[in-house]
């Protein structure tokens, strides 16, 4: 039995994702595909447009055999920790042979070469990097100079470090190397629209384009042609019942959370130093909504996405000391099932025999299976989902959504 792993957000799922799932199995000869998917909040610092159970159902309808939730602490982290948490989860299952991801370059050997260089920085690299940073160069400029000094044969390829999927792919490779994992990475070249492209004209458009198109049009019909036919009816049925959720739907809740922080100090949250904490407090009287406040806070050294993630850490009470604790104890303490495809029972049996962490299908079982640290992490996932479900319930009031998607009542998805 061969198994391939995919790390994803599916925010939302589109034709490019369906292609990736199909090609991942073909490329690796896998019998089964496990998807590690972000929950109700995603790495760009926003709520997912569709809740995690709807996205799970969609993934299972399009080639996934098992969907596991990436804990919120990693789903809302930088590329390094996002990749590290997801790779660790796949590695601890004990059954994954390959990790397949998309990249702009499509060359896994080159990505692995950069991963090895950046993971094991030699003295020349470190000295050149630090010298560039002290001179006021941006990190990418200083890093590229360090690569030229330490590994001149890679100088011609440093442009791959400017593409988001390449960067994430390198982080996946670094995480595999750190763990000395037996999982073999492979990549599928991304084509069609670029990651940040908002055009709907490409064969495979970006998820960002779909989000923007739906927000502007107010109708799922504007994006269905970019999605597999298998999910059209589902998207139409759930529209204005459980989705769409956008960043500005967090605005009032975020404002309240920032105003109610008891310490008036935000440095205990990841990615927030004293300078940013002071800036949040200084500009808080100008708060109008979540997206515009992120724009107000961003600077030369802090992107909109990094600011948005930082604010979500505050909203969801994701603390720096907890993340440090989790990292020191090997990051992942359970594999929470969101759904599986009927026919994947041999995969589940193999995981139960080989996994290094409990496979959770019911929250009721968690108390008997998890360590205190694992329980603490899981409670944060549940809290994050309840925050999200509260937003959904309020936005689509009258649709009886709250009782349907309460975490303690929600059954895992079976297709």
Image: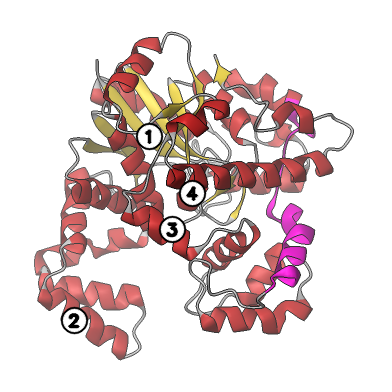
Q: Is residue 194 visible?
A: no
Q: Quadrant of residue 164?
A: bottom left
Disc 3/disc 1 C-alpha distance (Å): 23 Å
Vertical comparison of 295 with 59: above or below: below
Q: Are there few (<14), some (14-19), or many (20+) residues within 10 Å of tag 4?
A: many
Q: Residue at x 33, y 51 (%)?
A: 329
Tags 2 and 3 touching, CB below 8 Å: no
- Closest to the camera, between mark 2 and mark 3, is 3
**Dot 4 corresponds to which residue?**
75
The outermost residue toward the right is 398
**Dot 1 corresponds to which residue?**
6
Q: Where, quadrant-wise, is the N terminus in this rendering?
A: top left
Secondary structure of residue under mark 1:
strand
Q: Quadrant of residue 162?
A: bottom left
Is 259 covered by the magenta stretch?
A: yes
Disc 2/disc 3 C-alpha distance (Å): 30 Å
Secondary structure of residue under mark 2:
helix
Give the side of residue 413 with respect to residue 222, left or right.
left
Q: Where, quadrant-wise, is the C terminus in this rendering?
A: top right
Disc 2/disc 4 C-alpha distance (Å): 32 Å
In primary-sequence order, the first of circles 2 and 4 is 4
Query: Residue 128 has which mark?
Result: 2
The outermost residue toward the bottom is 135
Which stretch did the figure color magenta? 238-262
Secondary structure of residue under mark 3:
helix
**Dot 3 corresponds to which residue?**
323
């Amino acid at each position: 039995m061969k198994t391939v792993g995919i790390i994803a957000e599916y925010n939302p799922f589109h034709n490019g994702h369906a292609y990736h799932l199909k090609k991942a199995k073909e490329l690796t000869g896998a019998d089964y595909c496990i998807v590690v998917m972000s929950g109700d909040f995603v790495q760009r610092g926003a709520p997912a447009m569709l809740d995690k159970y709807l996205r799970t159902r969609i993934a299972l309808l399009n080639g996934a055999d098992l969907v596991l939730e990436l804990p919120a602490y990693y789903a809302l982290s930088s590329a390094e920790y996002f990749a590290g948490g997801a790779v660790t989860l796949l590695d601890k299952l004990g059954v994954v042979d390959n990790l397949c991801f998309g990249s702009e370059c499509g060359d896994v050997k080159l990505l692995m070469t950069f991963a090895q260089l950046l993971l094991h920085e030699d003295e020349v690299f470190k000295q050149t990097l630090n010298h560039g940073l002290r001179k006021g160069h941006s990190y990418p400029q200083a890093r590229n100079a360090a690569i030229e000094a330490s590994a001149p044969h890679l100088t011609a390829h440093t442009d791959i470090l400017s593409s988001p999927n390449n960067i994430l792919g390198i982080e996946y490779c670094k995480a595999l190397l750190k763990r000395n994992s037996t999982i073999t990475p492979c990549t599928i070249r991304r084509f069609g629209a670029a990651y940040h492209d908002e055009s709907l004209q490409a064969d495979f458009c970006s998820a960002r384009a779909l989000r923007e198109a739906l927000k502007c049009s107010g109708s799922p019909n504007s994006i269905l042609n970019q999605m597999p036919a298998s999910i059209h009816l589902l998207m139409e049925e759930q529209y204005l019942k459980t989705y769409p959720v956008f960043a500005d739907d967090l605005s009032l809740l975020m404002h309240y959370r920032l105003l109610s922080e008891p310490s008036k100090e935000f440095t205990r949250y990841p990615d927030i130093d004293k300078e940013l904490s002071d800036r949040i407090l200084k500009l808080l009287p100008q708060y109008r909504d979540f997206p515009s406040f992120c724009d107000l806070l961003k600077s030369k050294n802090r992107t909109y996405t990094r600011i948005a993630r930082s604010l979500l850490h505050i909203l969801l009470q994701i603390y720096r000391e907890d993340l440090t604790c989790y990292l020191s104890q090997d990051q992942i303490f359970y594999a929470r099932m969101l759904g599986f495809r009927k026919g994947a029972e041999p995969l589940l049996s193999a995981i139960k025999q080989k996994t290094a962490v409990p496979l959770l299908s019911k929250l009721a079982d968690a108390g008997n299976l998890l360590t205190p640290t694992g329980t603490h992490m899981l409670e944060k996932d549940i809290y994050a989902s309840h925050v999200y479900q509260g937003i959904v319930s309020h936005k689509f009031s009258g649709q009886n959504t709250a009782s349907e998607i309460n975490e303690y009542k929600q059954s895992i998805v079976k297709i």
